[in-house]
Image (spheres, rainbow, N blue to C red):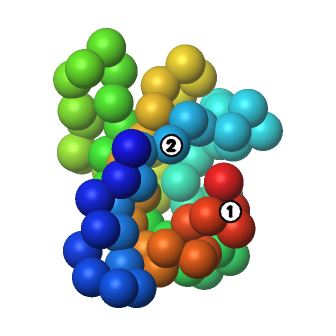
Amino acid sequence: DYVELDEEYAIFEVSIPGAWCGKSVGQLNVRNKYNINIMAFKHHGKLNLNITSDTVLPSDDTMLVLGKIQDIQKCF
């Protein structure tokens, strides 16, 4: 699922890659490596918007990411 914000940017709900689970947002350095921002994690329909660089990515959840559509599609 995604919400297009304009021609370039969107918010996507994506599955968390297995290789990312158990690592912190800071360790993954997603913003610098992929030009996307993790906005929230979603677990059983409930959103966790309290994301910091110390937040560890859970398994079996999805996440909301914001960025350029082409960057998000390339990453996921």
The image quadrant of residue 6 is bottom left
Q: CA distance from mark 2 to mark 1?
A: 10 Å
Q: Is residue 10 visible?
A: yes
The residue at the point 34 percent across, 61 percent down is 11
The residue at the point 36 percent across, 37 percent down is 41
| Location of mark 2 (residue) | 14
Name which residue type carries label 2.
Val
Q: Is residue 29 visible?
A: no
The residue at the point 40 percent across, 85 percent down is 8
The image quadrant of residue 67 is bottom left
From the viewer's perspective, tell me whether residue 38 is left or right of residue 18: left
Label drawn at residue 27: none
Label 2, secondary structure: give it.
Answer: strand
The answer to which of marks 2 and 1 sits earlier in the sequence is 2
User: Looking at the image, do the residues carrying marks 2 and 1 touch, with CB atoms under 8 Å apart?
Assistant: no
Residue 65: % across, % down = 41, 57
Neighbour tally class for label 1: few under 14, some 14-19, many 20 plus, Cα within 10 Å: few
The residue at the point 46 percent across, 33 percent down is 62
